Image: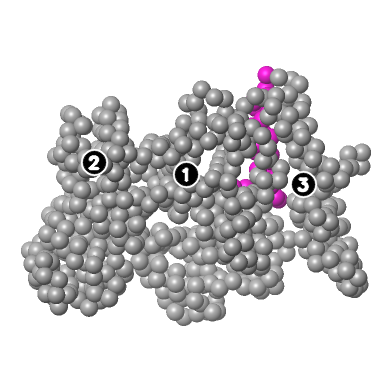
Amino acid sequence: MWADIDTDQDFLNYSEVAELAKELIGNQKMLPLSLGIFGGWGAGKSSMLRLLESSLNESEQDFLIVKFDAWLYQDFDDARAALMEVVASTLLQAADADEGLVQKVKKFSKRIDMLRAFGMLADAGATLAGFPTFGLLSKGAQSIGQIINGDGCQEDFQTVKDAASDIKEKTQGVLKDSEKRTPPAEIAAFRQEFSEILGSLGKTLVVFIDNLDRCLPKNAIQTLEAVRLFLFLPQSAFIIAADEEMIRHAVSEHYGNLNERLITDYLDKLIQVPIRVPRLGVHEVRAYMFMLFALAAEVDEINLESLRNELVLNLRECWRQEPISKEAAIGLLGDSATEDLANAFGIADRMATILANSSRVQGNPRIVKRMLNVVRMRSRIAKRRGMPLDEAIIAKIALFERCTDNQATAEFYRLINEAAGGKAEIISRLEEATEDQERFKKTCPEIWQQKHFSFIIEWFQLEPHLAGVDLRPALYLSRETIPLRFSRTGLSAQAADTLNVLLRAKTSNSPSAKQAIVGLDPSEHIPVMEALVAEFRKESDWKRKPAGFDGAIILADHASNSGKTLADFIHSLGLEKLPPWLNVMVKKADWFNGKEGF
């Protein structure tokens, strides 16, 4: 089995990209620099960050590295202040031996509190005046605008008065009368002190920002603004890892549905050098699977590194030479090579092309790893229960599940279930017809032809062949192990269907939604709720109920563990008061009662 986490071991020649990024960061003429690592879910953005970090640490140049996980600070009062405080904390550690510099950094940290205080006291008015702050007074912004334009009424004046009173309480002890400053002066002083501290340290500050695409639009934009407005100074570089489409969505949401050109212009100004994590081809998927299987076999470190180096070198030269053969790969492992490992390499060799080209996988490293984890789990269960089913057959069937859909998989298992001895005659006929496409098409069930014909014919050509094999154990294993995940959100076919039903629910008493949840495996309750929450994170206006929220309430009421996930999300929104529609839906819910902040 393989842990589903990022790594600093390079299996995919990402280190070549990391070296190029390091050269940019190490070039003083290029600073300040903002570099974007763009890629979808599971593409390897975080792993690329770790490889870049390792490369910088091994460099002869002196870098000061700050790691900021934007999602961890989702509940912070202001994302910009959170980023700056993490930077200040790192600067303080770096200045530890220089008392004068320590005091300067401490003064710099207090200035962050000052900037947050300005935001608490005057966000709406300051924004209208033309300078950015750190806003908690947004509820009075519209009323202030009405008053300034001469259109204000008594209600507008009262709104601003109430907001100011509320903010005054929150800022008590943060801003002293003797320390009052104007926001522009504070920002200028902040940048000046920050620049002086970096100059005194004599190091290049490199800030890694990860998981920005998991944040609410407001938090994502605030973090990006902090980079450009407050921290983007000489001797600094910012590496931002995110799903570009999610950031584009955040820009559109935050600034009011901008057109594509304006969104692109905004990103181009924020990110000077975009690096897109390349989609894996057949060679990369194959090499990746070789390394995963070698890791799982606990090959000794020397032989494992020998294999890794050869594979990475081969990937760099794949434009002019053939991929390394599985026999040569096994030979690199010396005494560590076993028959089981050779068989596993054979599986990788046969499956790589389909995994790289399938529209439901597209060479995504995380999806590949998750599928192999399911294969290994099923193989272990098969061995424990004495099932006559080897790993190659289990892997082939898992590939079918991953690259088709729920309906196609259900048809496959129906054919097995109805066949005598689990040996479906149609499988034999299809395997015999793979060289004759017309004959194959006439034999192939219609449900397989509609969406997956090209995959199906390629799959039946793939070894091992299944003609005459009792596949009832495979049917059993598919029901007895963790549901296979294949969608972009990582849900099983059944869970993905349930998610779609919940998103369409119009009321919290929807019979179809309740029925869908009843048939859902309990292990999928939280993943489905997380997928719903991911949709809700796209919302910026909580005065109205987002699509799918009724479905989320039904799931939360059915499974309290998923309810906690929903409650945590609601709390993370930082709402001073729940909107009426939301208050009605959660006020009597056991999974919500007791949450702080409301």
Crowd tier of the residue under label 2, counting other residues whose Cα lies within 10 Å: few below 14, some 14–19, many 20 or above: few
Which stretch appears magenta?
Answer: 68-97
Q: Quadrant of residue 259?
A: bottom right
Instruction: Return the x and y of residue 181 as percentages of the image width and height.
Output: 87, 43
Name the mark on residue 46.
Answer: 1
Gap between marks 1 and 3 measured at Cα? 30 Å
Q: Which residue is mark 2?
A: 321
For this view, does 538 lie left or right of residue 181? Answer: left
The quadrant of the picture occupied by the C terminus is bottom right
Earlier residue among tags 2 and 3: 3
Q: Of helix, strand and loop, which one carries label 2? A: loop
- Is residue 19 something one can see in this rendering? yes
Residue beneath the point at 46% across and 52% down: 39
Residue lying at 77% horizontally and 26% vertically, measured from the top left: 103
Which amino acid type corresponds to the residue marked 3 in the rendered image? Arg
- Closer mark to the observer between disc 2 and disc 3: 2
Q: Secondary structure at mark 3?
A: helix
Tell me the kind of residue under disc 2: Gln
Q: CA distance from mark 1 to mark 2?
A: 30 Å
Q: State the residue at coordinates (76%, 55%).
A: 136
Q: Which quadrant of the figure has residue 128? A: bottom right
| Residue 554 seen by the camera | no
Mark nearer the N terminus (1 vs 2): 1
Measured as percent of width and height from the top left, residue 456 is found at 21, 66
Q: Nearer the viewer, residue 360 or 261?
A: 261
* Residue type at tag 1: Ser
Mark 1 and mark 2 residues within 8 Å of each other at the beta carbon: no
The residues bearing labels 2 and 3 have C-alpha atoms spaced at a distance of 57 Å
Q: Which mark is residue 116?
A: 3
Instruction: State yes or no: discs 1 and 3 in contact (Cβ < 8 Å).
Output: no
Image quadrant occupied by the N terminus: top left
